[in-house]
């Protein structure tokens, strides 16, 4: 049987340890093509490049690698667009993004370049998963994630995903033995209380650093935040139809359809 074709991307850049781990796992499951940013693109959300030229060059980071890799000057969403429309000879069977340095649980999903790459693939009808590890360290240990990344990916390859849905997978910063298992969750209700650290440069011009505190308002035991805090891998199905369907009927009662 033909091996599944897997597109690998991320937002931390093509040389990041997380994507190198993800590539190793995916090569056990299928044929791999990597298209990833040439520099970190964290927090880019679903940004795309429209006012600058895009460059996408083949690279070989290790002499022993036998799969295709491309370094892209654009965003994670750009990487998926270029991969599927210009680089890959056929539509991939799966797109995986990550493994991200740091959480993309709860509200973080809307800012995430990692998840936006997965969502972009989903909009093109490709099953997709975003993986993130709750460790921001440059020396983060991704080895404990391998077992869970492989198991979840295998299931998606076997079962597929509903149309319009991608998976947001977050992994706790624990040893493989200490991870209790996998929980299917909903996104926790949470937000950031943000502040700007205002400073002045030597030329007298003000500049700002964004800081903030994460506030989890949700005490439910079926959320991604609860799962991660209690030693589980969280899996949240994410839809990219942003319509608030439950509000449509209420808005229709406003009589706006009579305005002319």
Image (cartoon, rainbow, N blue to C red):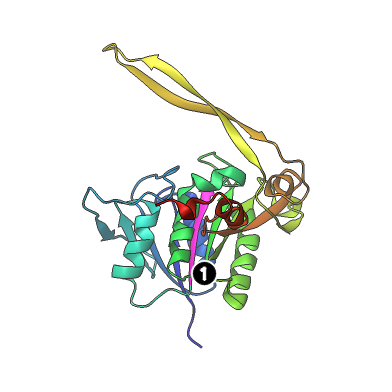
In this view, the residue farthest toward the left is 53
Q: Is residue 62 visible?
A: no
Q: What residue do we see at 32% from left, 63% from top?
A: 82
Q: What residue do we see at 62% from left, 76% from top?
A: 159
Q: Is residue 157 visible?
A: yes
Task: Characterize the magenta stretch by its predominant secondary structure.
Answer: strand
- Where residue 158 sits: x, y (%)? 61, 77
Number of numbered discs? 1
Q: Is residue 147 left or right of residue 98?
A: right
Task: Depth check: give the residue in front, 46 or 159.
Answer: 46
- Where residue 144 sits: x, y (%)? 64, 54
Q: What residue do we see at 70% from left, 55% from top?
A: 185
Categorize mark 1 by other alpha carbons within 10 Å: few (<14), some (14-19), many (20+).
Answer: many
Q: Is residue 248 magenta?
A: no
Q: Is residue 97 magenta?
A: yes
Task: Depth check: give the residue in front, 120 or 209.
Answer: 120
Query: Which SS class for mark 1?
Result: loop
Q: Is residue 2 left or right of residue 52?
A: right
Q: Is residue 113 left or right of residue 177?
A: left
Magenta span covers which residues?
94-100
- Establish if 40 lies above or below 169: above
- Where residue 133 sits: x, y (%)? 59, 48
In this view, the residue farthest toward the bottom is 1
- Establish if 207 lies above or below 161: above
Q: Which residue is mark 1?
A: 127
């Amino acid at each position: 049987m033909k091996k599944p074709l897997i597109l690998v991307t991320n937002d931390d850049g093509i040389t990041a340890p997380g994507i190198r781990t993800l590539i190793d796992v995916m090569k056990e499951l299928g044929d791999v093509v990597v298209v990833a940013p040439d520099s970190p693109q964290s927090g880019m959300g679903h940004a795309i490049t429209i006012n600058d030229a895009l460059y996408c060059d083949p690279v070989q980071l290790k002499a022993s690698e036998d799969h295709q890799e491309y370094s892209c000057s654009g965003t994670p969403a750009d990487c998926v667009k270029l991969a599927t429309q210009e680089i890959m000879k056929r539509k991939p069977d799966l797109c995986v993004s990550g493994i991200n340095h740091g959480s993309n649980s709860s509200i973080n999903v809307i800012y995430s370049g990692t998840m936006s790459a997965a969502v972009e693939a989903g909009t093109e009808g490709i099953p997709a998963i975003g993986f993130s590890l709750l460790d921001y360290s440059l020396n983060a240990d991704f080895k404990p994630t391998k077992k869970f990344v492989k198991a979840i990916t295998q299931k998606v390859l076997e079962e597929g995903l509903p149309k319009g849905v991608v998976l947001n997978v977050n992994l706790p910063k624990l040893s493989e033995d200490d991870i209790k298992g996998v929980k299917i969750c909903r996104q926790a209700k949470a937000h950031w209380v943000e502040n700007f650290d205002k400073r002045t440069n030597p030329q007298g011009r003000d500049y700002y650093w964004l800081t903030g505190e994460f506030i989890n308002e949700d005490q439910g035991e079926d959320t991604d935040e609860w799962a991660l805090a209690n030693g589980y891998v969280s899996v949240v199905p994410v839809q990219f139809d942003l319509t608030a369907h439950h509000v449509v009927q209420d808005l229709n009662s406003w009589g706006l359809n009579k305005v002319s």
